[in-house]
Structure formats: structure tokens, C-alpha cells
């Protein structure tokens, strides 16, 4: 059975109740299935924002993309998770990551663990959620072997970074999905695969602004960046064809874009539904 597409959009920043809720209703009207909140210091707190959006919408899901597991104690996080699950009528996805910004740990007055320790703590948090909030879908996003092994074994949704170019000689996205398939075993067919888009056209030029993507991939040329799966180009119809190819080739059906992509990507959603 072919899985249906699902579309998410990340809310960057807003603090006033009316603007947050108006934007959530607009996202719902444009055809998005879920609005995501990030988890960084000195910006908006994700749980109050998600609650406000859930209260203003009927079908729109809310979720984190992603919480830094290192900031949370599992039992206290489970209290917030189950409360939002209930207030939203079950319209909540919990996205979790291991955390990677050393400065944020320092600003939060927390020790900065090693990469292995961060993934170990993420496993501890995920296992607690599996036991105490088992009906809340869990997304784990990342690229490393340890993190993807955990995601394959414990998550419902896997966020693939898709930050390496696909060429005639190399397909890193297929390699990562193959790794997940091996580690997931019989679970694989139940997993939902996600790509977060970092660049796409927002005008009629067909060309994306690569400035954000370039910050994460400074070693790549523009041509190489355009070959990464997280960067989309062309018309709305071209992009829709690209996403159908992602589904047919890789099984990727869950696409997330940024807030400033929302209006342009809504045209792609219309092509796919």
C-alpha cells in the first residue's frame, strides 16, 4: 500500500496569541497537516505555542521538530506530552533529538555530554515515552548510526537530514534508508520517513535561495547543494514530480518546509492532492 503524503511547516517565531492562532488557521487552510515548533533557548517555548495553535484549529496537528532531549527529565516531559495530547484531542507528534549546540547547554547551566552520552540520554527519554505515552507518535531526526539505530528501533517517524548530494556515483539518502531498514527489521514498513526542506523557490524564478542551506553545508558548491534532497527547485509541478519520485524511490512521504516557504509550497500541496 502506498502511504499518503503528509506536509508540515515550521513556525519560526511569534508571541502574540492572535498572530499565532491566525497563522495556525491559515496553515490548516493551506492544506498543511502539522505545524512544528523548534526547541532553542531565547525564543518561544514550544509547549505553550503548540497549545495555542491546537486550541484554534480543528484538524491541524502540532509537533516539535525537535525537542532537545538533554533539556528534559523523562517523567516531567511525559507530563507535558500527555497534557498536550489530551488538550489537542490527540493531535500531537513528539519530535526528539539528541541536542548538538554546546552553547545552549552552557546557557542552560547543563553539562555538555559526549555524542554517545547524548544519544544514550535520548534513548532513555524515548523508552520512557514509549511506556508512558505510547499513543503519541515519536519522531527522531538525525543522521548518525547510533541515532538512526535508536530511531529504527523505537520511533514512529524518522527525520532524514538529506544533506548530501545525490549523484550518478553516490546516493547517501538511499544508504541511510537502507541502514534504517536493516536496523528496523519487521518494523520498517510501519515507519514514516521525513525530509525537512531547507531551500525551495518562493517566486516564479524556479530557483531557491541557498543561503540557509549553505550555512550548514559550507563545503559544497551551489551545484552540489542543488543535488541534495532537502533542496527543491523548479515550478510547483516540477517539485510535485520530485516528491512523487522521493516516494516511489525512497518511501519518503512526509515533507516539512519552513514558514517562509509556506505560501509557495501550498501550491505544491495542491498538485499532490
Image (cartoon, rainbow, N blue to C red):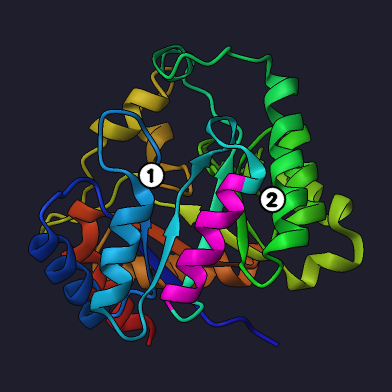
- Is residue 140 found left or right of 90 in the rendered image? right
Seen from the viewer's position, the closer of residues 160 and 123 is 123
Mark 1–mark 2 Cα distance, whole angstroms, equals 27 Å
Q: Which mark is residue 174?
A: 2
The percent position of residue 156, horizontal first and vertical second, equals: 68, 63
Q: Secondary structure at mark 1?
A: loop
Q: Is residue 27 visible?
A: yes
- Is residue 254 found left or right of 175 in the rendered image? left
Q: For mark 1, what is the residue?
A: 38
Q: Residue at x 38, y 44 (%)?
A: 38
Q: In the rendered view, would you say 226 is above or below 203?
A: above
The percent position of residue 228, horizontal first and vertical second, equals: 47, 42
- Is residue 209 found left or right of 149 in the rendered image? left
The percent position of residue 44, horizontal first and vertical second, equals: 26, 42
Q: Secondary structure at mark 2?
A: helix
Question: What range is drawn magenta here?
Answer: 76-88
Q: Residue at x 18, y 52 (%)?
A: 260
Q: Residue at x 54, y 52 (%)?
A: 95
The percent position of residue 273, horizontal first and vertical second, equals: 37, 88
User: CB under 8 Å between callouts 1 and 2?
Assistant: no
Q: Main secondary structure of the magenta part?
A: helix
Q: Quadrant of residue 97?
A: top right
Amino acid at each position: 500500500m502506498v502511504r499518503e503524503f503528509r506536509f508540515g511547516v515550521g513556525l519560526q517565531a511569534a508571541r502574540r496569541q492572535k498572530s499565532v492562532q491566525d497563522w495556525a488557521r491559515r496553515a490548516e487552510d493551506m492544506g498543511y497537516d502539522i505545524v512544528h515548533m523548534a526547541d532553542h533557548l531565547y525564543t518561544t517555548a514550544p509547549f505553550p505555542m503548540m497549545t495555542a495553535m491546537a486550541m484554534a484549529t480543528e484538524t491541524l496537528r502540532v509537533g516539535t521538530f525537535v525537542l532537545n532531549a538533554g533539556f528534559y527529565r523523562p517523567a516531567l516531559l511525559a507530563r507535558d506530552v500527555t497534557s498536550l495530547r489530551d488538550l489537542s484531542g490527540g493531535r500531537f507528534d513528539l519530535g526528539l533529538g539528541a541536542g548538538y549546540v554546546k552553547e545552549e547547554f552552557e546557557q542552560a547551566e547543563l553539562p555538555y555530554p559526549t555524542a554517545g552520552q547524548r544519544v544514550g540520554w535520548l534513548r532513555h527519554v524515548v523508552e520512557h515515552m514509549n511506556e508512558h505515552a505510547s499513543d503519541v507518535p515519536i519522531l527522531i531526526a538525525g543522521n548518525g548510526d547510533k541515532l538512526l539505530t535508536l530511531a529504527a528501533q523505537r520511533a514512529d517517524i524518522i527525520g532524514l537530514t538529506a544533506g548530501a548530494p545525490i549523484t550518478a556515483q553516490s546516493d547517501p539518502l538511499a544508504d541511510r534508508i537502507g541502514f534504517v531498514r536493516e536496523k528496523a527489521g519487521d518494523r520498517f514498513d510501519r515507519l514514516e520517513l521525513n525530509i525537512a526542506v531547507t531551500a525551495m523557490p518562493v517566486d516564479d524564478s524556479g530557483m531557491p535561495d541557498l543561503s540557509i542551506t549553505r550555512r550548514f553545508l559550507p563545503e559544497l558548491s551551489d551545484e552540489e547543494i542543488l543535488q541534495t534532497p532537502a533542496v527543491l527547485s523548479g515550478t510547483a509541478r516540477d517539485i510535485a514530480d520530485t516528491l512523487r519520485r522521493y516516494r516511489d524511490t525512497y518511501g519518503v512521504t512526509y515533507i516539512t518546509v519552513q514558514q517562509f516557504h509556506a505560501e509557495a509550497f501550498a501550491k505544491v500541496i495542491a498538485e499532490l492532492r
